[in-house]
Image: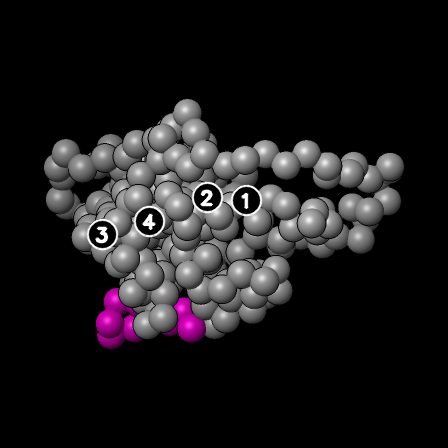
Amino acid sequence: LEVTGGPVIDFQPGRVDHPDESYWEQMSYGRLPAAEKYCCPHLDDSNVSSSLDETGKVKGWEGLCTHVRNEVFYRMGFNDQEIVALLCGGHVYGRCHPNASGYAGPWVENMTEFSNEYATDMIEDEWTLVSHGDTWLDAQGSAELRPAPGNRQFVNQKKGVTGDDPNQMMLLSDMILAWDPDFRPILEMYAEDEDKLKVDFGAAFKRLTELGCGFP
């Protein structure tokens, strides 16, 4: 994080390794947020826009908020501000791969540098819901944004409109930060203040990496 312009986080040694693999046998898949959980079913690749309500939000997005809050972050002791900080700081790095997560593309243009680009782009850019069946992405030079079959995501491209914008995407579980009335003001705060995001992300990320370690 530090070498990419992100927060400087003091390292605390002392995490104890488990003596064998038995601990992991108790774990189930799903320790990270599921990108579309509780949203309306995705049934028709030819008409993915039918998933949207009249305001442009995916139907059932409120349930996805409940999942991200109650089933993932609240159970670890994080509040809404820390949730937004972790997503805004974490999702400026790297990209999604359809053969791994089922989703495709980078969140931001500069994915090896810390910034508040994720927050600003989510608010300022226009986002289009796509599925694997949206082959127009390939024709427009945005094949890297087409998710695996059965999945949906938002992209910063529009059918029939070409330009110089770099290919970027947002998961449904990202977009809830802009849709939820409690998440939205925090997202806007970080879009305006990168320095505050750096401080808040650093504190939340350090706590996340040390959960369960029993440090004083």
Q: Residues within 10 Å of mark 4 (few under 14, many from 20)?
A: some
Residue that appears at 53% across and 57% down: 34
Q: Please, is residue 21 above or below residue 191 in the view?
A: above
Please say if the residues under marks 2 and 1 sit with CB atoms less than 8 Å apart: yes
**Percent from the top left, x then y, of residue 198?**
37, 43
| Residue at numbered disc 4 | 196
Which numbered dot is residue 202? Answer: 2
Residue 192 image label? 3
10 Å crowding of disc 1: few (<14), some (14-19), many (20+)? some
Query: Which portion, as a residue range, is magenta?
Result: 52-62
Question: Quick one: SS at disc 3?
Answer: helix
Amino acid marked by disc 4: Lys
Is 147 or 198 nearer to us in this picture?
A: 198
Disc 2 secondary structure class: helix
Residue for badge 1: 206
Which numbered disc, 4 or 2, marks the residue that appears first in the sequence?
4
Is tag 1's residue or tag 3's residue first in the polypeptide sequence? Answer: 3
Residue 59 placement (x, y as % from top left): 38, 71
Residue placed furthest toward the top: 3
**Which quadrant would the N terminus be assigned to in this image?**
top left
**What amino acid type should be assigned to the residue bearing mark 1?**
Lys
Q: At numbered mark 4, what does the secondary structure look like: helix, strand or loop?
A: helix
